[in-house]
Amino acid sequence: MTEPTARRRSRGPATAATVDALHEDLEALWAEAGHVPEADRMAFALAVVEAAGNAVVHAVPAAQDPVQLEVDLSAGPARLEAVIWEIGAAPARVDLSAAMAPADSESGRGLALIQALVSRVVFERRDGTNVWELCREHGEDRP
């Protein structure tokens, strides 16, 4: 695997303010990864913010301590990656095979949106933590 050209990592409470701070992390990532096309930046950023937002809305604490979000963003020569840990969250069921919710539904489109914006989405439970992995291939060589 090729080393990323830029990386950002942050951690904070699973709140809207932490999700808002992701925008600054993404801007700092783009400042170091000028090779990433604008369309890929926008799609990846929207998917990352949507996944983090889902954690804020849906993650349930496993104990008394509030849920924390840790986000690792990286930009490589041909790939953007994000790993989002829901630290302290109870196990969650995320159905990545579910169809898009109807247009008149008030929720249920986030997962389908994330999948449409990235090349790969993984959601799994690892060592007592819910983990999202998002990957988007970028540039001329992408499939």
Image (cartoon, rainbow, N blue to C red):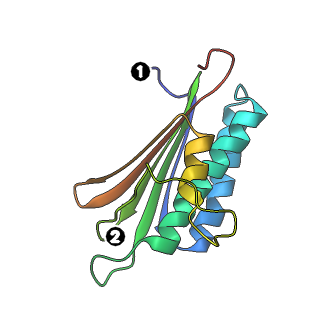
Left or right of residue 118: residue 88: left
Q: Secondary structure at mark 1?
A: loop
- Give residue 90's position: percent from left, percent from top: 30, 71
What residue is pinned by disc 2?
89
Which residue is drawn at the image coordinates 28% and 76% (left, top)? 62
Q: Is residue 87 left or right of residue 126?
A: right
Q: Position of residue 103 (x, y in %)?
A: 69, 63
With respect to residue 132, does 76 lie above or below? Answer: above
Residue, x 60% and y 72% (percent of image)? 16
Of circles 1 and 2, the one toward us is: 2
What kind of residue is marked 1?
Met
The image's mark for residue 51 is none
Q: Residue furthest left?
A: 127
Question: Tag 2: residue type?
Answer: Ala
Give the quadrant of residue 1. top left
Crowding at label 1, few (<14), some or many (≥20) Cα neighbours within 10 Å? Answer: few
> What numbered label is drawn on residue 1?
1
Left or right of 13? Residue 102 is right
Residue closer to the observer: 5 or 133: 133
Q: Earlier in the sequence, mark 1 or mark 2?
A: 1
Number of numbered discs overlaid on the protein picture: 2
Q: Position of residue 38 (x, y in %)?
A: 77, 35
What is the quadrant of residue 6 in the picture?
Answer: top right
Neighbourhood count class around disc 2 (C-alpha, 10 Å): few under 14, some 14–19, many 20 upward: many
Looking at the image, the residue that sits furthest to the bottom is 64
Q: Position of residue 131 (x, y in %)?
A: 37, 53
Q: CA distance from mark 1 to mark 2?
A: 30 Å
Q: Name the residue at 42% across, 68% down.
A: 68
Q: Is residue 112 visible?
A: yes
Seen in the picture, residue 19 relative to 27 is either above or below; the reply is below
